[in-house]
Amino acid sequence: MNKSISRRHFLATTAATGAFVTLHPFSAMAQTNQAHLRILSTTDLHVHVHPYDYYADKPIDTVGLSRTASIIEEVRAESTNSILVDNGDFLQGNPMGDYIAYERGMNEGDMHPVMQAMNVLGYDCGTLGNHEFNYGVDFMDKVVKGAEFPMICANFVKSLGSNAGKDDTFLKPYTILERDITDGSGKTHSIKIGLIGFLPPQIMNWDKRHLEGKFNARDILQAAKGWVPEMKEAGADIVIALSHSGISSEPSFEGQGNAALYLAGVDGIDALVTGHSHLVFPSEAYADTDGIDLAAGTIQGKPATMAGFWGSHMGLIDLMLERSGDEWRVVTTESSARPIYERVDRTNIPLVEDVQMVLDATRDVHEETLEYIRRPVGMTDTALHSYFALVADDPSVQIVSQAQTWYIEQMMQGSEWEGIPILSAAAPFKAGGRGGPEYYTDVAPGPVAIKNVSDLYLYPNTVRAVLINGAQVKGWLERSASIFNQITAGEQDQVLLNPEMPSYNFDIMDGVTYQIDLTHPPKFNRGGEVINAGSNRIVNLQYNGAPIDPDAMFVVATNNYRASGGGNFPGTGDTIIFEGPDTNRDVIVRYIVEKGTINPQADANWGFAPVPDTSVIFETGPAGIGYADSVEGVNIEAAGEGADGFALYRIQL
């Protein structure tokens, strides 16, 4: 039975109020046997239905399907024909998702809030992303069954066949929507819109504990080449790929996770919805990528879009279709990604308002999630504070390192890097500076709530691992040590910290022991350029109690910013061996939940090399005085008032 492609919500209201709707040029220009089809898309929602940061426990203007919904409704109003699709990673990624999975649970017939929101908005199709598996396949299956639209995936299988067409897929590999479409003269025609979904095969590593021995994942291109011809034989007039896979120009290889560039080259695919990378397409992020025409919004000549993440954008592909006989073909295209906010003078300005029906459909779960984030999920025996994170080993950084190590140890199991020593690099984010004298992490011993994790880790970075040698470990630490001024032996109360150096570039490396000799000048400047090539601040660098071997290999757990070269640290940029699908915040929450009680006491694995008859002073928050006596490996004493509400402290080197 054919279903008319039309705007499903608010159209009657718009007409009744006499509001003027401007049609897209394709709709205005379409003639007899020409039709304008709009493909609206979301991707990487990660359960962000409400415009709320559950970690910070406050509303924000940069996320939320309730906001994206405003653009969806606006675009539907501008078009003659449209469909709405989701590109995966909707199920996990914020505390609302964790609340449903870990506490409330999903019984047969229960409706997940993200599905409630999608159903209200009238999605036409959806596919799976890698994060749909984080809570197990049974949980995912119960969620997906609540979709009032087809859910598809061509390369997640219960068993592999001799070729893609013989795979036993977990969901239907594709769907063909039979719709009535209106041409430029107002005449209605039938059209068959084929949609096929793909996810990164790396799920078999990322969620090994849920999938190994039970399921499998086929290469994206193999699956596409196997199923797309069948779709055409089944009558699909056009084929749209829902590719939960990023855009990368690296050479194609079997099992490639970011395969959208090569997927676009598969015969029979007319348009691509991409995602996974949490970027925007078209955008300048892809200005230098071969095979991409940013002005046209195409990948290998095919229109494509990527709608950011967490509802930050709505992806839009406009197709001008022309009918010849009983067939439709694409003649002209446009691609864009429409944002829900803009950044002006370091301030986020909302561009749209919430769609109330989305908020209403999920309000109860939102309120339950607020209760959840404010309740303890674990205990800490140690105060988690960052008042002295720039001058001594620190518990607030220690917990991050412990969680990263715990996670990467699991990810390395069964890989070619299993058995290589794992180190962990983490930096203090809340460490005063321009944030002021109260801008510090301060979680008292006792219950730890999920919202406390925002104090421990400010940014939505994702976990990555790099493979580097001992010499690069030393270089990494030399770069970190640039935060300190050079000290003259025998002088008193010298200023320790260089205020031009940001705290987020002061990485502590757990898994090794070392000292910093402040009498040497810094080797690097703020930008990471070498300014004193012969300087060696890092001394007594050891692994397992012995001097580190410059040629020995180490896996270092870190975040996507650092691993990709952020801060210009030696050993980063081109050494990534693992790109985790999980944010560092989520990893910390999982670690705390699993351990129950944590005891991230600083182990003083680093400190300053002794300099007799020499002292330094530094500023930190005045509330730090309550912790000064408990700092491991260094004697800290109050030294009076600092500027702008800070307090001064002294260290005898």
Image (cartoon, rainbow, N blue to C red):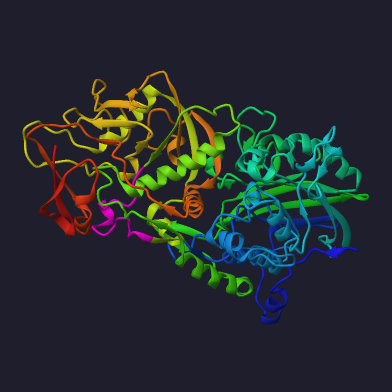
Residue 539 in the image: state x and y as whole percent.
Answer: 25, 26
Residue farthest toward the bottom in the current orientation of the protein: 16
Residue drawn at (48%, 31%), measured in percent from left and top? 466
Measured as percent of width and height from the top left, residue 556 is found at 44, 33
Nearer to me, 85 or 619: 619
Q: Name the residue at 67% across, 63% down.
A: 106
Q: Would residue 496 be found to the left or right of residue 508 on screen?
A: left
At which x and y percent is residue 593?
A: 50, 55
In the image, is residue 411 above or below residue 107?
above
Q: Nearer the viewer, residue 111 or 527?
A: 111
In the image: residue 305, left or right of residue 595: right
Mark yes or no: residue 431 visible: yes
Residue 559 part of the magenta-drawn span = no
Q: Looking at the magenta stretch, what is its main secondary structure?
A: loop
**Residue 560 visible in the displayed image:** no
Position of 287 with respect to 35 (left or right) is left
Say if the magenta span includes residue 445.
yes
Which stretch did the figure color magenta?
427-446
Among all residues in the image, which is located at the extreme right? 325
Q: Please tell me which residue lies in front, 586 or 324.
A: 586
Please name whichever residue, 288 or 513, is drawn nearer the observer in this view of the structure: 513
